[in-house]
Image (tube, grey):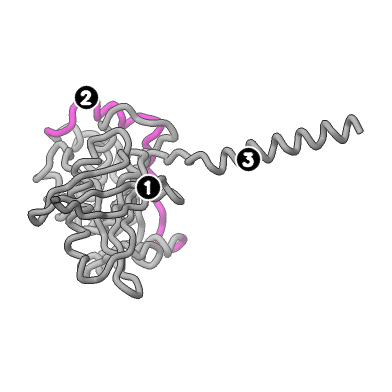
Amino acid sequence: MFFVGIGLGLLAGYLLVALLKRRKPQPIPTEIEFWVYLPTDKMPSQDDLMTDLSKAQALGPPELLLFSDIRLHIAVALRAKNLEYFRPDLTDPRVEPTAETLEALANATAMARVRFSSDLPIPDDRYLRLVPYLAYALAKRAGAKAILDVAGSRLMTVEELEQTLQGDRKLQSPGSHVNVIWQPLEAGGHAETRGFGKKGQPDLRTLPVRQDQRVLVVELLEEAVKQLWPLAKHPETVSIHAYDDEFNLLLGPPQAGVVPVRISRMHAI
């Protein structure tokens, strides 16, 4: 009976620990990743890439030091062995290709993966500048036509990424990192963000709303992104003034790595 009691006690302790772990939100790894679709399987040399990066006025020694950081990974995947990577819109329904990017995907024979990841929080934002500039430099050197921002579910031409870098050289604007997407449902739809994982934070998803509320809900979520991006973690409430009215966005606890958002209108008494 003594050993049976010990066994039952150990089992109860194990179940309690497992339950607590299940209830405790799991940390989200910090990860920013770009896929550069290459017309050949030849990669530019690291010396050439470093030369190009050193010419970027937005980057300085702190960013360039990350080029040799163990958390930075550059790899090549051949089309013949990784077909699924060359139609990202089929594996991620949030990706919206255009005729131009589809043509670039069809003509690509390889894909360069540029990724910076960490299981621990990163105290600065140097990596948020380095990786997009590195992906752009690689694309220009290799003659690539299309680039995928994986965390942002954003497939773009190299020219579109260039426009982003020219308009926001330090990449400090939330819109350069986070994408707000409308996802249709059988009745209406919801808006959601893609890109907060670049800072190790969960993305947001509104509760389902009617189709005629789409413009309002997307705009409110875009305004919320502007407030939330500079913060170290999401607050419980975000207040937004829009359309001559006040709105409260209530952010619930993360569910499967996504924060549910309930929108309420504040009426004056």
Which badge, 3 or 2, comes first in the chain's sequence?
Answer: 3
The residue type indicated by label 2 comes to Pro
Residue at screen point 29% across, 53% down: 193
The residue type indicated by label 3 comes to Ala
Q: Nearer the viewer, mark 2 or mark 1?
A: 1
Q: Which residue is mark 2?
A: 61
Residue at screen point 26% across, 66% down: 97
Residue 49: horizontal and vertical position, in percent?
25, 38
Q: Is residue 42 left or right of 9 when viewed as pictured? A: left
Residue 71: horizontal and vertical position, in percent?
39, 34
Q: Which residues are magenta?
A: 57-81
Q: Quadrant of the N terminus?
A: top right
Residue 222: horizontal and vertical position, in percent?
19, 52
- Marker disc for residue 18: 3
Q: Which residue is mark 1?
A: 252
Assign a secondary structure to mark 2.
Answer: helix
Which residue is nearer to you in this view: 13 or 95? 13
Which residue is nearer to you in this view: 102 or 106? 102
